Amino acid sequence: MLNQKSRRDFLKNASKTSVAVAVGGIAIAGCGSNSSNSLANGVAQGRSKKKEILYRDTKNWNSYYASAK
């Protein structure tokens, strides 16, 4: 009976600890985001002066887009 009780106490303490760690992790993750450093519409904002080139208009891209329609 004593073994049964200590096992239950261990499981209670372990579940309380895991919940506390999960809540703490969520709180830390939520506090770390800053609106000036966050992603805007999925695009990272930085200080680079370079123009972002997503693709070049080539024959292969044109054939891909034509077949994708």
Image (cartoon, helix red, strand yellow):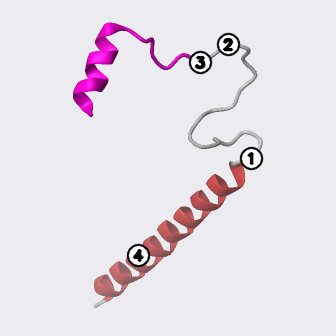
Which stretch is magenta? Answer: 52-69
Q: Position of residue 29 (x, y in %)?
A: 62, 53
Relative to 39, say whether 67 is above or below.
Answer: above
Residue where numbered disc 3 is placed: 52
9 to 38, vertically: above or below? below
Residue at the spot of label 2: 50
Judge by depth and name the residue closer to the eye, 2 or 17. 17
Left or right of 1 in this view: 16: right
Q: Amino acid at mark 1?
A: Asn
Dot 1: few (<14), some (14–19), or many (≥20) neighbours within 10 Å? Answer: few
Going from N to C along the chain, the mark reached first, 1 or 4, is 4
Residue of label 1: 34
Say what secondary structure mark 1 lies in.
loop
Among numbered discs 3 and 4, the one appearing first in the sequence = 4
Mark on residue 10?
4
- Identified by mark 4, the residue type is Phe
Give the farthest residue toward the top. 59
Question: Nearer the observer, disc 1 or disc 4?
Answer: 1
Dot 1 or dot 2: first in sequence order is 1
The CA span between labels 1 and 2 is 24 Å
Q: Assign the N terminus to one quadrant of the image.
A: bottom left
